[in-house]
Amino acid sequence: MTAIIIDGKARGLALRTTVAAGVAEFAAAHGRAPGLSVVLVGQDPASAVYVRMKGVATREAGMVSAEHILPAETSEPELLALIAALNADPTVDGILVQLPLPRHIDTDRVLAAVDPAKDVDGFHPINVGKLSAGLDALVPCTPAGCLLLILEALGDISGKEALVIGRSNIVGKPMAALLLAKSATVTIAHSRTRDLAAHVARAEIVVAAVGVAGLVKGEWIRPGACVIDVGTNRVTGADGKARLVGDIEFEPARARAGWITPVPGGVGPMTIAGLLANTLQAAKARVS
Amino acid sequence: MTAIIIDGKARGLALRTTVAAGVAEFAAAHGRAPGLSVVLVGQDPASAVYVRMKGVATREAGMVSAEHILPAETSEPELLALIAALNADPTVDGILVQLPLPRHIDTDRVLAAVDPAKDVDGFHPINVGKLSAGLDALVPCTPAGCLLLILEALGDISGKEALVIGRSNIVGKPMAALLLAKSATVTIAHSRTRDLAAHVARAEIVVAAVGVAGLVKGEWIRPGACVIDVGTNRVTGADGKARLVGDIEFEPARARAGWITPVPGGVGPMTIAGLLANTLQAAKARVS
């Protein structure tokens, strides 16, 4: 068996097209486009790239994008004051605080200061809790995108054996909550897990989100499994060139899996598309 | 091997004694005892028993107990008004709304109306989210009690294979979050899970919370496992007498397990003790 390679780029583009149509409808009905404000503190190069990409994608979808780029020495009260202003601004539907924040700022406090109705990253504790409890919530973009890919591959996943590798608040835990809500039997593995190979071997769905290149060996994969690789690791090849690889050994996994996401071009494009979808969802909820 | 039978009654009593000492300290420091208000809507006999037991235990621990017994036909706005009054009352540290509520009342809306700082059941979405995210939170009493029993039996559970059977918001999901926070590898099984026997067979920790008498067969248990039975099912024996049994076949499980909770006398007493502990915790946090 050779896996179907899931084209996240095409799927993300399709989602962005759907969102753009929704944005046009929203603008026609309410006389304004949905607005997303992205806040970046400091100069982290990767973060700056992400923020720029998000801004471009937001405008391409027809939404209003505002990027607030603050110096690295911004104080926590200054940042909280900006968030309070964005919370109060009726033209702002979504607020995204780019992580990581500088160390002198309490990330949990900042995330909890975002109006939950504008929390398009789904990181506010109340959105985390609603997701867990099965209530309507803004859901973190990456696991939401992974779920879309899984459902498109497999259809109904009720009763399927799902393995989430990684227990971050950004991917692993919300991914587990989403799979559980779709009635999969969910196992959460992480750095302390002893026999990861055995867990992978029985999983019909594998989502890897740890950030360790090639952690999951291809030979572990259960034949026919749906394999989603959230890892994005920069490695230097034998030729001395840097390239991106996932947490899963791609070629040997592809030889066994039923479906697999490549890195890059798999989960990545779904994350930004998910952010746009969340912003539209937040805008609609705010006017309803 | 014959399992050690975990004495939840003795363990619950010990916890209550610790709480009572904390209550005395609190009262000496702040000139008043912590206060717990329990709200019951309607006449459900089991709920009435629970509310009465909670009131007795609260007073025994030296705290102030108030029981608000409302008629079954109480409207949602009336109930919300009572909760608002309790939220505003500085002498009330904990608010517990006894579930289930009558059908004409939106349970989610009521639970979300309780001040999260007084939410001693840990059911408010913000406490659910904080638990998931690893932040300080008021944690649901039953899974918190189960975790205490597990840790006392096993010590460090990092890397251990844990199975939670049941995915309720009250037990299963918070139990999984607590075990994950202690670095167990956690699987959540439920009614759609296909091969429950295989999951039980590899679990070093089993928590069953589904409410189906004898669902978990004793022969499935992994030798030496720590087995926690949250189920409380009323069955009629061959002699025509009603008795309480758990979700796990007790005798055959006991023959294989390393530790096991009986029903009754296992998890049950930990739940009320946990409620008292949460009320004291809430009181301390409110004055700090």
Image: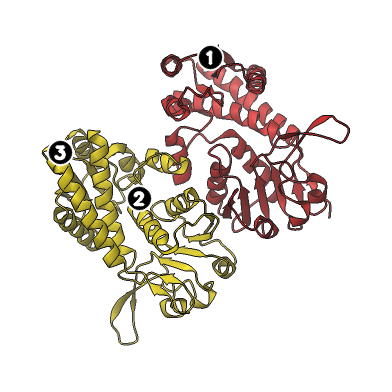
Chain colours: A red, B yellow
Chain on which label 3 sits: B
Chain holding disc 2: B
Position of A188 with respect to B41 (left or right) is right
Residue that protrudes farthest toward the left in the picture: B31
What residue is shown with label 3? B29
Q: CA distance from mark 3 to mark 1?
A: 56 Å
Quadrant in the rendering for residue A40: top right
Please tell me which residue lies in front, A48 or A8.
Answer: A48
Looking at the picture, does residue B233 appear above or below residue A196? below
Residue closest to the eye, A86 or A61? A86
- Give the class, few, some or many, for how many residues have Cα within 10 Å of label 1's Cα (few <14, many ≥20): some
Outermost right residue: A239
Q: Which residue is found at the position 49% from the left and 69% from the top? A: B225
Amino acid type at mark 1: Arg
- Placement of A205 over or under A68, stated as above or below: below
Q: Is residue B41 visible?
A: no
Q: Are marks 2 and 1 on the same chain?
A: no
Total residue callouts? 3
Point out the frontmost of discs 3 and 1.
Answer: 3
Mark identifier at residue B140:
2
- Host chain of mark 1: A
| Amino acid, disc 2 | Pro
What is the secondary structure assignment of the residue under circle 1?
Answer: loop
Q: Whole-percent x and y of residue B112?
A: 34, 39
Please provide percent x and percent y for residue A266.
73, 37
Viewer-side label of 2, 1: 2
Q: Residue at x 32, y 69 (%)?
A: B7
| Three-letter code, disc 3 | Ala
Residue B56 horizontal/vertical position (percent): 15, 58
Q: Residues within 10 Å of mark 2 (few under 14, many from 20)?
A: many
Considering depth in this image, is A25 or B270 the residue closer to the camera?
A: B270
Q: Which mark is residue A32?
A: 1
